[in-house]
Amino acid sequence: MDTPTVSAGSMVRGKSKNRAHPGTLVKVVSYLPVLDSLVWLWKAFKMCIRLMTGTTEMLRLCDRVLTNPDTPRTALEIMPGTGDQDSSSLVKPTSSRVNPDLATRVDQCLHFSTKLMVERKWIETGNDESMEAAFAAILRVKLFPMGGSVKTPHAVLLHQCLVKISSSWALIHKLGARAKTPYDSNDPAHEKLLLELWDLASPREALTGRTSSQWQTIGFQGNDPATDFRGLGLLGLDCLVHHARHHPESLKEGLQISRHPTKWFSHAVVGINVAAYALELARTRRLQYTFHTLGATRTVFKEVYVYIADGFAQHWEREPDSTTVMDFGDVFKRYCEGFEDDLALGKGVPVLNPASPLFKKKRKDR
């Protein structure tokens, strides 16, 4: 079954939704045996196709792209034949133009395959050598042409997909390492980044001291913002600075919303919570399509953070005036549920501007 084409545009936000009544959950649970049966039927169907055609789903996915007349010719290069083929040339996909839908489907095949559990773990290390070893094994297990030769068009296309998938996991590991790096007030680089945040968020007000109640005006809890980074390390600070540096109007609007006289919230602290949530989305593979579309870079991750933070501020503003900071947990949960619904429905990539020049490839951003 083909995956519907997903728009590469910015994800369209929906208004807050009323979540299902608890009784609905009981009904859903009652259908789980039926859903389980459907899964087994789907697996049986795929096995029948494999037996009849001598092909696997992963091979068919690649073949569908290579034989599709609608595939843009600019996405393919012609490379000399190897002498092992009847044709004098082979079609080689260029790495930068591999269809993100295909990369995501291959990723799904890897995730759900019981025969590729070891190979999937190798790819998820984000290590190039491990990925190459997994690639060679997958070609054999998934019955790719010429006994799993790496020289066929199908193999080249698969390799480019695996490069994208492996790169996304390498990014996730880097983000995790950054989140585990504690803020150090004695580190000049850390202090410089924090002071830049102040200058960007409050350009018209000079900071009177490194520890000051002024920090609370941009949403920190106390006089020393360093204490608020304990849960997410430098990743939280990175995201806050990125928001202020590249989306000042969005940040300004969010700060104004957060300063409501009764319906206020701590903007910077909420931002750190949003960064932690975005990291969890990445770790649970829910940002894979975004990474496959825009690139597995820290900039793309931080742009997803900005989208979520900006959307939450708008969501909070739509809440009743009786809402207080004590309701934050419930409000944030509802917002995240709606956001995840939109992700699951494939409403585009969750960034404010998919055509932003920030997404141009930069080696240092990997």
Image (cartoon, rainbow, N blue to C red):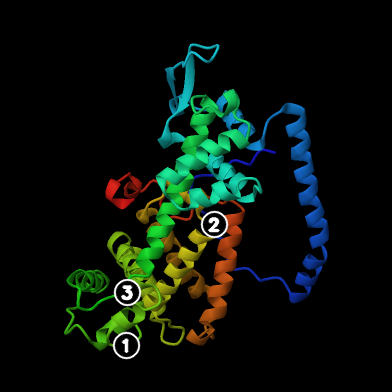
Q: Are marks 2 and 3 in contact (CB under 8 Å)?
A: no
Percent across and percent down for residue 219 are 35, 80
> In percent of the image, x 75 and y 44: which residue is there?
43
Question: Residue type at mark 2?
Answer: Arg
Question: Residue type at mark 3?
Answer: Pro
Residue 160: assigned label? none
Q: Left or right: where does residue 325 sit relative to residue 212?
A: right
Residue at numbered disc 3? 182
> In percent of the image, x 46 and y 64: which residue is there?
279
Q: Left or right: where does residue 53 sit relative to residue 338?
A: right
Could you tell me which secondary element the residue under label 3 belongs to? Answer: loop
Dot 3 surroundings within 10 Å: few (below 14), some, or many (20 or more)? some
> Is 7 in front, or is 127?
127
55 is higher (above) or lower (below) than 333: above
Q: Tell me the CA gap for discs 2 and 3.
A: 26 Å
Residue at numbered disc 1? 222
Does residue 6 appear in this view?
no
Does residue 8 appear in this view?
yes
> Is 180 in front, or is 333?
180
Residue at numbered disc 2? 286
> Is 85 in front, or is 329?
85
Could you tell me which secondary element the residue under label 2 belongs to? Answer: loop
Q: Quadrant of residue 148?
A: top right
Q: Tell me the CA gap for discs 1 and 2.
A: 34 Å
> Is 251 in front, or is 226?
226
